[in-house]
Image (cartoon, helix red, strand yellow):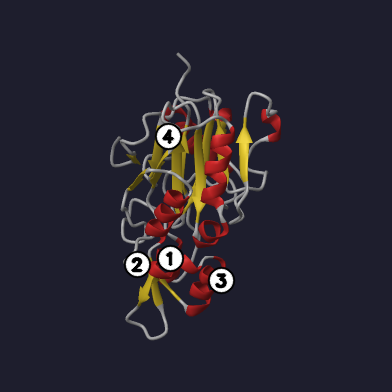
Amino acid sequence: MSDAVLGSDLLSVPHGFFTRLGGVSPKPYDSLNCSLSSPDDLENVRENRARVARQIQVEPDMLLGLKQTHSDITVPVTVETPLWAMGTGQNGDALVTDRPDVGVSIITADCGPVLLASGDGRVVGAAHAGWRGAAGGILESVVAQMKALGASEIRAAVGPCIGPESYEVGPDMRDAVLAQDQKAEVFFRLAERAGHFIFDLPGYCAARLRAAGVQKIEVLGVDTLTDQRFFSHRRRTLAGGGHIGHQISAIRPRLSS
């Protein structure tokens, strides 16, 4: 791996948590913007995604994604899945596959990207876990779908996302999380601003994965708000708005021996 692509030693399959570095998009999408729904030039995004596909050793049209909606929907991709039906137009927030010719990916710009692999590397998953998705069950969903494909000894890596020192939220967000998961209270602490809280999103994701039966978990501990290698919705908001790109995280199963 490099400064442009981060990885986890737990995942012994082709994968990467990609930064915003190494692409072709101009400002404000500079440079590895991989969001097909952004106002960036479509040909730039396609080239960026092709570079990601080559990095994880799949053909560009076999790097799959979803239209992410902060849901608990995991979409499985198997030999029976018609790939013409896949792509970023299908709703969902996680993909799993046992096809070594397929890469599964998710897009983020502060939410938690979670990549998962079975112990033998034959089944992998990618999940988009913002606070809504994490509290709503997307991580349990992706683990269950991986097990349905035969995965065991699942390990997971929580990639770059807004960090536990940066994620200040209001009481409405805290109440919304606790309404779905009272155990999440330990991941909130009081902020300096009265009536606000700091939320530990990566720690919460790790706890949900652990409760779902994932025993080996790595939290990369990279904060997208403070690390300029990454796109960040919160950084954009603090700077007054404007368009930004989105980074991608992707993974592919091990080739059959």
Circles 2 and 1: CB atoms closer than 8 Å: yes
Q: Quadrant of residue 133?
A: bottom right
Q: Name which of mark 3 and mark 4 comes first in the sequence.
A: 4
At horizontal 42% and vertical 59% (from top left) the residue drawn is 204
Task: Please name the amino acid that badge 2 sits on.
Answer: Ser
Figure check: 80 above or below 95: above
The image's mark for residue 166 is 2
Q: Where in the figure is residue 76, as x and y percent of width and height? A: 62, 36
Looking at the image, residue 200 lies above or below residue 89: below
CA–CA distance between discs 1 and 3?
24 Å
Residue type highlighted by circle 3: Ala
Q: Nearer the viewer, residue 183 or 190?
A: 183
The answer to whether residue 26 is visible is: no
Image quadrant in which the C terminus is located:
top left
Residue bearing the label numbered 3: 179
Residue appearing at x 57%, y 47% in the figure: 141
Q: Quadrant of the N terminus?
A: top left
Tell me the element at label 1. Answer: helix
Q: Earlier in the sequence, mark 1 or mark 4?
A: 4
- Say what secondary structure mark 4 lies in: loop
Mark 3 and mark 4 residues within 8 Å of each other at the beta carbon: no
Q: Nearer the viewer, residue 190 or 229?
A: 190
Which numbered marker is on residue 153?
4
Neighbourhood count class around disc 2 (C-alpha, 10 Å): few under 14, some 14–19, many 20 upward: some
The answer to whether 25 is drawn above or below residue 147 in the figure is below
Residue marked by disc 1: 234
